[in-house]
Amino acid sequence: MSQRPKIALIGNPNAGKSSLFNSLTGLRQKTGNFPGVTMDKLTGVWEIEPGKEVDILDLPGIYSIYPKSIDEELVINILGNPTHEDYPDMAIVVADASNLKRNLLLFSQVRDLGIPTVLALNMIDVAESEGYVINSIKLARELNVEVAEINAKKGIGVNGLRLAVSKTLANRYASNDGLPLPVDEQLLAGIELKFGEADPYRSLLWLMEHDRLKMFSPDQRKTFDAIQDEFQFKSEEYKTSETVKRYEALSEVVERCVINLNRQWDAPPVKTWTDRLDSLFLHSVGGYLFFFLLLFVMFQAVFTWAVYPMDAIDGGVAYLNDWLKAVLPASALTGLLTDGLVAGIGGVLIFVPQIAFLFFFIAMLEETGYMSRVMFIMDKLMRRFGLNGKSVVPLISGVACAVPAIMSTRSIGSWKDRLITIMVTPLMSCSARLPIYTILISLVVPEKSILFGLFNLQGLALFGMYLLGFLMAIISAWVMKQILQVKERSYFIMELPTYKAPRFKHMAISILNSVKAFVFEAGKIIVAISIVLWVLASYGPGDSMSEVDARLRKANPMLSASELSNRIAAEKLEQSYAGHFGHFIEPAIKPLGYDWKIGIALITSFAAREVFVGTMSTIYSLGGDVDDENATIKNRMRAEINPDTGKPLYDAALGFSLLIFYAFAMQCMSTLATTYRETKSWKYPAIQFFYMTALAYLAAFITYQVLA
Amino acid sequence: MNTRKTLADLKIGERGEIIGFTDALLSLKLLEMGCLPGSDVEMTHLAPFGDPIAIKVSGYTLTMRKDEAATIQINPLKN
């Protein structure tokens, strides 16, 4: 535990909290979030004076301290619990000055909890351009707190904020107005008796939100229920009256401290950029068209632009492998290094460009404010399928990774909508499927431009795979909606933020973090499995492996040396442990068109699908028919021959069958673990695993049988 | 009163003044988001298929579903 003072950043969504956090802490942030998903608290360090540092805690944006969804619960769990490890020494409430009244509502609640608070007025320039002049000195006096004027985006006003924070930290003065609305003294006494002395407003928060506060045990919750019954205390009524009362008081404050120049002018409202853009993006036809076009461009870009760095990496890895083989003495260890490790790592690295592009696009959607427009235009459609406009965020983030995507469902207020979204999100094609798609599409779809060179056929096929995942997700959602007959209210009251230019530095940090997470997290698994696989593929039961050499030499005395060694390698693979596993499951996967080699890949990618390509490259470089020159994974797979037909193994039927299988199959332990964590039950990950695997098998079976 | 107009009755570009709420649970959320009695609202956008809607209130653009908008009672205002 650090002894540094802790400061919590609190504010409405879009008030500029994250910008302030970034300009205060710079790169000194401890947690990196995936783009599009800021579900958790972020911490960073701010050097407030030379030699004096404070911890800054950035909390999810909220409108009031009363949570409406799970992501908002975090804030009261910290602010309502002084024994929490993150309980702050003070708070900075970031307020959008152009809409002071609503932002002050949250401020007044936080202050009344007994937390020393500084008010940071952001977006004063916006307020002034709209004709509002704020007297912040008067406001500070009226509210009895330090007020700092800042411009979070440009990083202006940080010195004033430093001063206000230092002063507040020094005297720890929490201006406390007591309860906004009086309650029965006996009620407060009752809570104090059972739960110890506390600030009255905090006691009341405990009473009203005890089910959402993790600090209380089931027994304590029952005690709260009993107190509520005894005093006939109606939480929702109290909250509503409290909010009205606070607004009344704040209206007077705002009246005294803000001059509205528009009153004198009475000028007609100006059309802002946001209004103009919204008339396109929210248009009933144009809005959909634009969204579809955007997704399309995104996938074309991921496929076509990323090809150049990918080819470079692929070629580089193959070159390195050949070079290592040439300079190192031929031994089992060299084999492990080249065919096991380097091939495995190459399988991860090659997809970094595509994943970076994907994260870049998702970060753009979120940063600019366009994502909420998508929720708006999709809500009605999603509702028909048992989802919710807010499900769009998890579904789109699911294209990057299902783990943060499932976490982002916490903003969905309704449990049923949230559960269905969690269940179907893994059907969206995540970045780990991208490598598999890329390889298989390049094998079975010709590289051709169509429509006057506008579209690339392979890019189109890739887009089709993503579309397929999405369609299957909403169809599954619809089925679950029919099964889960729960009547529960869901609502869609949401703010549409103004459009903002993306903060490229901010985006660069989050893309870097995500790529790092992919390479290291996925990389660890892939490397480990590659090594295990190499061992399993290089050794076999008994002396079956050593036999192969002599037997084949004797049987084929006429073969050239290189052809013979290829035969030996292939035969050895078949006799190895991995070969035995592959043969063992071959009967089950034969109807899908897969041979035992693919069977090995299916087994290894059981826990993590990203292992597929690495496995393939290990298998084919061990049992390779290709000369070492230009021995990329793709070329090795292309050269694979179907022993029954004598034609290339990877024909359209097998290629599409495999594509479909990987699109639908649940092959990700991390996702199942996340589903368990978010639903707090083993039932849902189990259902998820079985329905997706069954779906994959069935769909791949149909595909193969139809195309073959 | 059945004749009371609600926010859901407004057409694009029309304005009204919020006078009250008919749903106790929703009203808290609406209040917190800045839909205050006495403030002006303007219907600005309809999503495809006419639902949800987007409104402008106290300087913000909020979205809500039609049935949610029907819980907000208004007095229509002339433009």
Image (cartoon, rainbow, N blue to C red):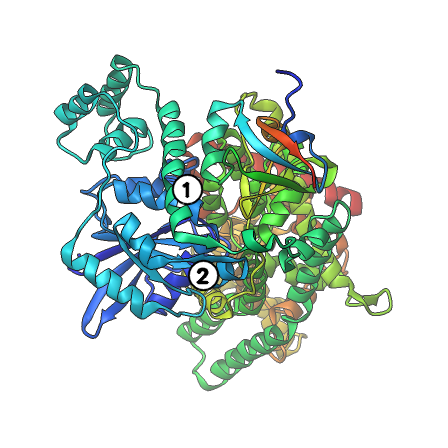
Name the kind of residue labelled 1 in the image: Ser
Q: Would residue A220 appear left or right of A299 to someone viewing this image?
A: left
Residue A184 appears at what percent x and percent y?
23, 20
Closer to us: A350 or A140: A140
- The residue nearer to you, when weighing A574 against A622, is A622
Residue drawn 25% across and 16% down?
A226
Q: Are marks 2 and 1 on the same chain?
A: yes
Q: Which residue is mark 2?
A: A124
Q: Position of residue A115 (x, y in %)?
A: 23, 46
> Tag 1: Cα neighbours inside 10 Å, few (<14), some, or many (≥20)?
some
Residue located at (79% from left, 43% from top): A706
- Seen from the viewer's position, the closer of residues A170 and A582 is A170
A659 in relation to A73, above or below: below
Q: In which image quadrant can residue A493 be found? A: top right
Return the mark for residue A663: none
Above or below, A586 against A508 in this view is above
Chain letter of the residue beneath label 2 in the structure image: A
Q: Is residue B15 left or right of residue A599?
A: right
Residue A408: x %, y % from top left:
47, 46
Q: Residues within 10 Å of mark 2 (few under 14, many from 20)?
A: many
For mark 1, what is the residue?
A: A251
Query: Is A365 on the left or on the right of A681, as rendered?
Result: right
Q: Secondary structure at mark 2?
A: helix
Indicate whether A330 appears above or below A88.
Answer: below
